[in-house]
Image (cartoon, coloured by chain):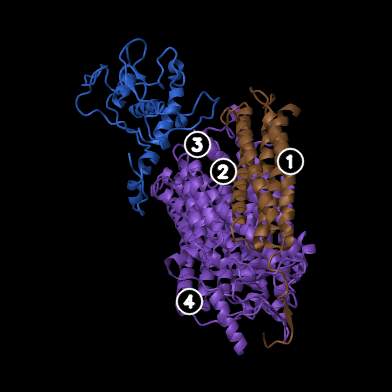
Chain colours: A brown, B blue, C purple
Amino acid sequence: MSSRSRTVDVSELPTFAFGHQGLIWWGTVGYMVIEASMFLISFVVYFYLRLKVDQWPPSLPDPDPTFGTINLVVLLGSLAPNYLAKAAAERLDLPKVRMWMAVMVVVGLLPLAIRFFEYFALGCRWDSNAYGSIVWVLLSLHTMHLATDAADTVVLGALMFTDKVEGKRFVDVSENALYWNFIVFSWIPVYLVIYFGPRWM
Amino acid sequence: MSRCGLRIVPCALCLVLAACGREARPFDNIPSATANATTPALVQLYAGGVPTGPPPVSPFQQNAWGISEGKRLFDAYNCSGCHAHGGGGIGPALMDDAWIYGNHPANIFETIVEGRPNGMPSFRGKIPDTQVWQLVAFVQSMNGQAPIAALPGRSDHLSGGTPENLRPAVKPVQTGHQ
Amino acid sequence: MTTDETQLRQELERTWAVPRGIIGWFSIVDHRTIGRRYLVTAFVFFGIAGLLAAAMRVQLAWPDSRFMGPDRYNQVFTVHGTAMMFLFAVPVMEGMGVYLVPLMIGTRNIAFPRLNTFSYFVYLFGGITLFAALATNTGPDVGWFSYVPLAGPDYSPGKRADFWAQLITFTEVAALAVAVELVATIFKTRAPGMSLNRIPLFVWSMLVMSFMIIFAMPAVVTSSSFLLLDRLVGTHFYNPAEGGDTLLWQHLFWFFGHPEVYIIFVPALGMVSAIITAFTSRPIFGYTAMVLALVATGFIGFGLWVHHMFATGLPQLGLTYFTAASMIISIPSGVQIFCWIASLWRGRPRFETPLLFALGFIAIFVLGGLSGVTLASVPFDLQVHDTYYVVAHFHYVLLGGAVFPLIGGIYFWFPKITGRMMDDRIGRWSFWTLFIGFNVTFFPMHFLGLMGMPRRVYTYPATMGWGMLNLISSIGAIALVAGGVLLVYNVVRSAAWGVEAGDNPWGADSLEWGTSSPPPVYNFLHIPVVEGRHALWARSEDAPIVTGIRSDTREVLITDVMDAEPSNKADYPNPTIWPFVTAVVTSAFFVGSIFTPWALPVSLPPLTVALVGWFWPKRSDLHTGEERPPALSEARA
């Protein structure tokens, strides 16, 4: 209450909001833009180094795309449970959120296991030459995001099974799903550059 | 070898951490003890034996700059011509654990200055003592006998194997002539 | 104040209280405290870096001086530049933003308050690490931009260059965090009625700065990480023999490095606008043009970086493009200068200390811009590249373009931050001492550069004929130090004994002046509804206020991006120790990874613990049962 005659009363407004109407979305998107810039810079470095030599990869075999392609399929497939987790969160459907978050925990850890084999399939070490260095960095950048979001999913998923769930946790699930989408979609250009850069250039 | 510290700022932290020794850049030359001798020095130190008396201290053993200079000089004086980059060839390998005359820095110094049987030339008068000590420090660093933070990284050349700072340290063994 | 308002005030004070005690000090998530800490810490680093510069001027005052040897000198000039650019210039601007932006847009705290606290401690630890390195003879000695191969493993033995590269990591983590917070705060938490075309020019400048940080910093993160990897684990990014490239470093660094100077410069432009508005008591001439100029500067700033590489032998066609772009960027800055001059012309300016610094900025920055336009021309740059002409240029644009407005901003906002006025007479003395001292120090450097004196030399022979100008420059540096001392004296004295300022001692227009000095912990008793571009000047007698925000929990109003229509409410976090703990673990990880790659796996468990502690809600923070969910049809936005 106040002595003013004109007021704008916001007491009926929701106390949390999904998507860009909420605040967390902006933080998530902000970090996605930062990480995307890092990927873009790394792609630029890859092509910059490519254009300096004749043979690519220099004195090394082309990387074996088997595990990378398996990972691509797994990640693209993970978009479905991810979408369902996000939709369930936005419906505030706690049982479904719990189920799909549990799925996402498995789905989040599986690509990490496959990624372990991808490093061996690269056919080079980070200190073989500049090609080896940039390829390891590209893969590792993506691995880092994969690992942090997998950890995030594990913690958030665990939290959804406790009795400390409130409205903004559903927003967290939704934003985590958004970030997972970023991880999947960012894998596509990284995959193409690492495994087909040598073949197409 | 520790000459750090602005005259204004006391260097207490420096003594606590090991950084002073590692990071010093002692540009002044070490006074030469052997440069003008024309006969082999009659010293207590001799090939294969146990040194008597206090041996000269290797001034650059923990010094990153000294080791880096040694690395540069190793190619500049064509040590790599016989020893490659530690793998050996005409000369014995320097990066393994086998040391014919022992790996004490004074022994390595003697090796370079006096020469050794079977082909190691004597560089007395040709390489200043300061640089000999830098070479000594670098040779020791090849198999990890230097603090890891002082070891060189990969060189700006074709990569010839693991950089010094990534090699596992090996325990030196004195073998004598085989 | 009515009894209702008294009760509201007490509730808000309780809810938004700043915790006390030792643990409390590390747990504060309040933007004003963190903003003040940023400012104080940045100025401490400024002072140390300034003393390093004073030492350099002592060394260079006479030919063949042996006050400092070459190795010490290399460390001193490198740490001077590095500390000024990374530990002072960007953080101080961010600190001003962290303090002022929430107040200027009418909200109670910055977005993501715990991230804000985390970013401050990471910044602090980064600065301490760099100066500890300097104190242990491990100060980086390769210049503030650390070119390879000099900074590579062959030519920079030891750990000096690694400390430099890791300092980048510390400061960019902090800067990126604040940038994301500012974007979210400015876009989503403005008071109702403050549509985007009504936000103060300072807030626009913070928005542009934040976007520039977000797009530019990844490049330097990448380049410094590559350098660390090359040195620590043997990658070959900068090794030409194995397919790497030394120019890659320059491209990556300067792709960040050029926007970096605009990141520093753009907030200063916002400060000048705020000061001139207040001291002419009129709206700034050409608000739209000013906003477009800020945005244009931000965009064009990304297209200039190769002008730092004119002497590297790149193809001529490319260099021509960058010459053109480097000249074009003077146009938006010129537009701004003319708008300010028009504002001053129309109004009746009150020449108090903040305005003096704004005018000093115009004079010095224009000179710096002129030398910059000359440097944009490749043939001229090839003659003066890496000479003192360049040193003169960038000190003119940095000190003139950023530090003078910053000091003006300190004089201007000090009353708001502390509740006391700074002494205007000492202020004038400090201004003239700094202005004259600055010009005496740096103007001769143009001539030294034209006479061929290279940068970064620790001494020079008497026969070069550079002695007189260097001596004059060093004498000017004495005046600069004196001006700095006067400024510090004024700050300390005024904080203790200054005249009490009211809410709005300058009669300024923006919202921060509409609350007490210093602001209460909740910023505004009532969130206002903004009725015009100059919020206080446009405020009517019965201006509407916002009601319905809870005062028993840290509830904040979230509004729309374009028109600031009320949209929903967010619950901001209470004070917590976890951001500090996370900063400690993160910093330990950064320092450890200078020495060994095992720092990463070793740090992951404690880092995980710290982040879980940060994220895991406390039962007392829960609001289950008190929430209003969004309507399901709105949920999928």
Question: What distance separates the C-alpha of mark 2 from that of mark 3?
Answer: 12 Å
Labels 2 and 3 in the same subunit: yes
Q: Secondary structure at mark 2?
A: helix
Q: Can you name the residue that lies furthest to the bottom here?
A: C2
Q: Secondary structure at mark 4?
A: helix
Q: Secondary structure at mark 1?
A: helix
Query: In the rendered structure, are the residues bearing label 2 and label 4 in contact, judged by CB atoms less than 8 Å apart?
Result: no
Instruction: Kindly identify which residue carries mark 3.
Output: C232
Instruction: Kindly identify which residue carries mark 2.
Output: C224
Question: What distance separates the C-alpha of mark 1 from that of mark 3?
Answer: 38 Å
Image depth: mark 1 or mark 4 in front: 1
Query: In the rendered structure, are the residues bearing label 2 and label 3 in contact, judged by CB atoms less than 8 Å apart?
Result: no
Query: In the rendered structure, are the residues bearing label 1 and label 3 in contact, judged by CB atoms less than 8 Å apart?
Result: no
Q: Nearer the viewer, residue C335 or C30?
A: C30
Q: Evaluate whether residue C418 shows in this view.
A: yes
Disc 2 or 3, which lies upstream in sequence?
2
Q: Please, which chain is the residue tagged with disc 1 on?
A: A
Neighbour tally class for label 4: few under 14, some 14-19, many 20 plus, Cα within 10 Å: many
Label 2 amino acid? Ser
Q: Please, which chain is the residue tagged with disc 4 on?
A: C
Q: Can you name the residue that lies furthest to the front here?
A: A95
Percent across and percent down for residue C249 are: 60, 40
Labels 1 and 3 in the same subunit: no
Percent across and percent down for residue A127 are: 56, 30
Q: Quadrant of residue B67?
A: top left
Q: Nearer the viewer, residue A12 or C61?
A: A12
